[in-house]
Image (cartoon, rainbow, N blue to C red):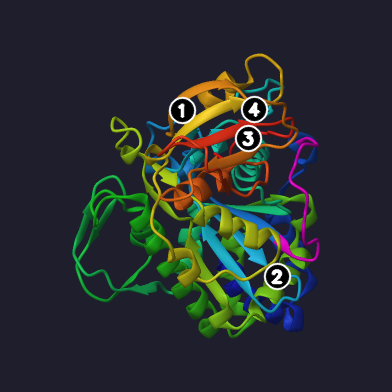
Amino acid sequence: MVLWLIGVVAGLVLLAGGAGGWLYQRLDGNISASDIDDMLGGDRPVSLSPGAKNILMVGSDSRAGVNAKYGKDLTTMQSDTLMVLHVSADRKWGAVVSLPRDSWVEVPACDRSDGTRSAPRHSKINSAFAIGGDVGGAAACTIKTVEHNTGLRIDHFITLDFQGFEGMVNALGGIGVCPQQAIHDVKAHLDLDAGCQIVKDEKALGYVRTRYSVGDGSDIGCIGRQQELMQALTAKAQQRLTSPGDVYGFLDSATKSVTTDKALAGIQPLYGLASKLRRIPRERLTFVTVPNYPREVDVPADKANITWQYPQTHALFGARARDEEFTKAQLASGPTVAAGSVQVLVLNGTGRPGVAAAVARQLDTAGYSVTGTGNAPQSAQQTTVTHPPTGLDLHANALASRLKTATSPRTDPAAAPRVITLTGGDDYTGLFG
């Protein structure tokens, strides 16, 4: 899903040059808009680079209407594809970060469309889309969840459902794919031979949805196929959309299946965004997946979900917040430090009873090994992470990068061996995820 924006810009340019105003009105009327500002609340990350834009892009797994054939047993919407598009303030580069739907994160309390409010919980990240009740509420809860777990301010959202994706591919006469092995996936309604071929209709949709019958059956492999097909869709749209007649079916399918926030709704705002994307050189538009490892490493009973990897995840989203490029090579640098390998002693530096126990519960839920709790020898306004002089630098940095309270680890010659000490101060605000 997502980078259809780069493809549709070609059609929008042509319509601007030669089509009648009634086409604008019809396509404008296709786009749904949701006013979600009140549902997001005031406790949001601060934008560190107001000129840059972060756009949450969601492929909706709704089973309503014609989409029911893809899973009638699901009674709620899910975010089948979840990505954050970053457009730099100077408009010279952009980046797409895929957030695997099996990411195990904290979903904060969210307002539902029926006036009720959900309780915070830990779950798959795509479950947030099911909470809101309607598309607007679903988008608001997903934005809150992404902001809560990344510290990144989301400026806009775009959702696209299954039917729209299929229509766009068909309007282009299909898209070329080259699977290395035959795919037979009952859940995705897909039977595909190995080798390069053109896919359209349900085969195109099945290709981006197939998961369990390919490779290791993980969501990570599914993300790779989605990115592959989106890049192919973008390239073919730019090649094929050469007249108003060619582009109308493509744009009609795209806009009918789109819901955005109010500021982005309409042909002109989407055209403006797509134009910015189109000017970005291909080599400076990057696609990455948030660093992760199987949650089973920390919680042996959980074989279905993944955990985001720190400090790499912190570095990735920190760079995005500061509007800095972050390469795939940088993302891959450094060993994986599983939360379960980090032993933590938690001390209460606030003087308020129960703080150490509450922090310990958060760490335990996140998979860390808590060795004990206690009171700090003196009060502390600032949260600190300390560790022995040798052997635990990587582990301490991984823990510190997961704290929402910014802190740099420091060595303590008197620290207990093999244990990192987290002292919660008055500024402690919890963990990412």
Q: Quadrant of residue 3?
A: bottom right
Q: Amino acid at mark 3?
A: Asp
Q: Amino acid at mark 4?
A: Ala
* Magenta-drawn stretch contains 49: yes
User: Mark 2 Cα within 10 Å, few/some/many (few <14, many 20+)?
Assistant: many
Q: Which numbered disc flags the more N-terminal residue, 1 or 2? A: 2
The answer, for residue 2, to whether it is visible in the render is: no
Residue that badge 3 annotates = 134
Residue that badge 4 annotates = 109
Residue that badge 1 annotates = 364
Which one is closest to the eye, mark 1 or mark 3?
Answer: 1
Which residue is depicted at the point 40% across and 72% down?
174
Which residue is depicted at the point 29% across and 33% down?
300
Give the CA distance from mark 1 to mark 3: 34 Å
CB under 8 Å between callouts 1 and 2? no
Which corner quadrant holds the C terminus? top right
> Disc 4 on helix, strand or loop?
loop
Question: Most prominent secondary structure in the magenta stretch?
Answer: loop
User: Mark 4 Cα within 10 Å, few/some/many (few <14, many 20+)?
Assistant: some
Is residue 261 placed above or below 371 in the rendered structure? below
Tag on residue 88? 2
